[in-house]
Image (cartoon, rainbow, N blue to C red):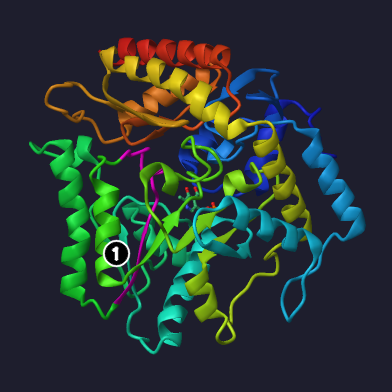
Amino acid sequence: MTTITNHLPTAELQALDAAHHMHPFTANGELAQKGARVITRAKGVYLTDSEGEEILDAMAGLWCVNIGYGRDELADVAARQMRELPYYNTFFQTTHVPAIALANKLAELAPGDLNHVFFAAGGSEANDTNIRMVRTYWANKGQPDKNIIISRKNAYHGSSVGSGSLGGMVHMHAQGGMPIPDIHHIDQPNWWAEGGDMSPEDFGLARAQELEKAILELGEDRVAAFIGEPIQGAGGVIVPPETYWPEIQRICDKYDILLIADEVICGFGRTGDWFGSQTVGIKPHIMTIAKGLSSGYAPIGGSIVCDEVAEVIAGGEFNHGYTYSGHPVAAAVALENLRILEEEGIVDHVRDVAAPYLKEKWEALADHPLVGEAKICGMMASIALTPDKASRAKFATEPGTVGYVCRDRCFANNLVMRHVGDRMIISPPLILTPADIDEMMRRIRKSLDEAHAELV
Ligand code: PLP
């Protein structure tokens, strides 16, 4: 059998990939036709592929490589931890130092009384934990029927059956028997696509008030929790109108509904604060974390839980957990990542340098003939592609066709930028310098110009 290394020619690697590797979320037709792009190494904000091309990664992998690629400190910590204690579990009254240290650090960083951490291996698992935890919380309090979780259409909370059900992605629900019972979806606060003639402020309020309507319809004594991403990520970087989150908070408080903030993308500096909840001004009972927790260097996620919920859960046995809950190597890597984020002032860099600079450049994209709104929050941003800015019109083609052309042009120009339908999004590493931002914007503009020329 061939020894498979970086030294094989691209075509050979692609053929071996096609023979045995099933890809997640991949256009399989295109994959079969063109083969996968093979990424071989990465440093800072650049990836290198098997052809030696240097690609600017404006998505930080999958929204996760917050500190950038190639930090040896994390590799060193992982190697040390693997030698000392490569694995042990945290079930059955057992613990270990990396899990203790990481839980303590997270309790220090998280706002308010979010002081307790239940670990998972990623965001989907953590949201599955949340489903069971909020239902168990109400059951332990003598209200087992208070078990409905309200979420939003076009939300993304993961790909397991539970977290995929919490999410509101139509194309996901069409496959494999989702959603599970007692998950209810209300409309999203996407003013550009769905705001009609309303002002963004009125629309934000109206969309938040759908939560109140749903609670009244379903019954206050049936609704356990509301979950939302502070800024929707995979749905297209939808930055809600400013009126939205304060109203959601008011409604959750009024009806005694637990508020879960899914911080898997927004957490660990992406919005210019440690957590997106701080940026949008909410006080969740539970925060879902993953991705930026380890900057993607090791698979780890979890739920940061407030005192009251943790206390009620600890009132009995919580029959839930994962083999890799608090995995010592992943926990040690995450802790080192948090040290770097903190000691190198990366969250301050986002707030004071990178995000303001990017915002100025990003909002100027609205002048481009293909671009309608250009929205940004910290280091996550989107543009809506439109044939007519004034009427916020959609293209006549199948949704995603124009986005796909733009994405393809970006790829050809050695830039990873993603499309969600006819919306283009970025979520770059947080360490981007103004010079990196200039280079990224140059590639984005070139790609948009080429897409425009190809489309008209
Ligand atoms: N929640 C949000 C907001 C996400 O964006 C994602 C992944 O993109 C998840 C949860 C799922 O995380 P994972 O892919 O680590 O399971």
Q: Is residue 284 magenta?
A: no
Q: Residue at x 40, y 22 (%)?
A: 359
- Mark 1 falls on what kind of element? helix
| Main SS of residues in magenta | loop
User: In x, y percent, where is residue 264?
Assistant: 51, 50
**The quadrant where residue 225 appears:** bottom left
Identify whether 315 is placed above or below 408. Answer: below
Q: Is residue 229 magenta?
A: yes
Identify whether 29 is placed above or below 214. Answer: above
User: Residue extending furthest left?
Assistant: 197
Left or right side of 150 for 329: right
Is the residue at mark 1 in contact range of ligand 1, meaning its CB lies under 8 Å from it? no
Can residue 36 be seen in this snapshot?
A: no
User: Residue extending furthest bottom?
Assistant: 142
User: In x, y percent, where is residue 428?
Assistant: 53, 29
User: In x, y percent, where is residue 135?
Assistant: 42, 78
Left or right side of 223 for 378: right
Quadrant where the image shows the N terminus? top right
What's drawn in magenta, residue-wise?
A: 223-239
Which one is in front, 406 or 426?
426
Can residue 158 be seen in this snapshot?
A: yes
Q: Residue at x 68, y 28 (%)?
A: 11
User: In x, y percent, where is residue 153?
Assistant: 29, 54
Which one is in front, 146 or 186?
146
Kindly identify which residue carries mark 1. 252
Give amino acid for label 1. Cys
Query: What is the crowding at mark 1: few (fewer than 14 residues within 10 Å), some, or many (at least 20)?
Result: some
